[in-house]
Image: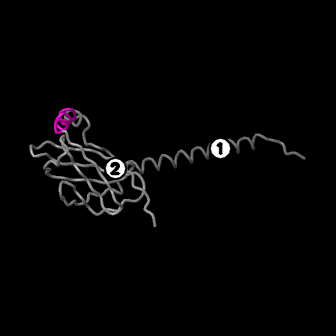
Amino acid sequence: MARELTGRHVLIVTLAAFGVIIAVNGTMAVLAIGSFPGLEVANSYVASQRFDRDRRAQDALGWTARASHDGTNLMIEVLDGQGGHPILRDFAVTVGRPTHRRADVAPEFQEAGGIYRTPLVLEPGAWTIRVRATSQDGTLFRQRLDHRAEARGN
C-alpha cells in the first residue's frame, strides 16, 4: 500500500533542500573569505595616479625578465632592449602561488653572468614570480612572470 504524501512530508523535503543549499553556500563563502590574500595596495587612488608615469618610465627601459627552473634551482634573467644584462640595484623576487600568499617566499639570489640563481624546489602547479629591481638611474622595474612547475620523475 502506497503512503500518502502529506503537508508535513512536503515541508520536511522543502526544509531539507533549502538546508543543503544554505549549508553549501555558507561553506563556499567561508572558504572564499579564508583564501582571499588581501589588498594589493593600501590606497588604490594614489597608486592609480602614479601608474601611468611609472609604466612609461619602465617601458622606456626596454627590459624584460624571464624565469627558468630545473627542479632544484630558480634562475631569473633580466635583459635590456639589446639582449644584454643591465646593471641592477635592489634586485628582489617573490615566488608564490597565484591564489594565496601562504606559500610566498622571497629567496636570496646570487648573480653570475647576469643570471640570478637561487636553490628553490617548487611543488607542481602554477606559480607567480614577481621580479623587482631598480635601474642605475633609479627607475623601478617590476614584472610578474607566470610559471608552471612540472612534477619531477622518480
Residue 78 rendering spot, x and y as whole percentages: 21, 48
Please give the residue where the numbered disc 1 appears in the rendered image.
17
Q: Where is residue 32 in the image (x, y as percent from the top left)?
A: 45, 47
Residue at position x 43%, y 62% from top? 152
Q: Residue 142 appears in which quarter of the rendering?
A: top left
Q: Disc 1 residue type? A: Ala
> Which residue does the numbered mark 2 point to in the structure image?
128
Residues at badges 1 and 2 in contact (C-beta under 8 Å)? no
**Residue type at numbered disc 2:** Thr
Q: Is residue 85 left or right of residue 121?
A: left
- Residue 58 falls within the magenta-colored stretch: yes
Magenta stretch: residue 139 in it? Answer: no
Q: Residues within 10 Å of mark 1 (few under 14, many from 20)?
A: few
In x, y percent, where is residue 153?
A: 45, 63
Q: Label 2, secondary structure: give it.
A: strand
The residue segment tinted magenta is 51-61
Q: Distance from label 1 to label 2 (Cα)?
A: 41 Å
Residue 89 vs 44, above or below: the answer is: below
> Image point 17% across, 56% down: which residue?
113
Density class for disc 2 (Cα within 10 Å; few <14, some 14-19, many ≥20) is: some
Residue located at (34% from left, 50% from top): 128
Q: How many labels does the image show?
A: 2
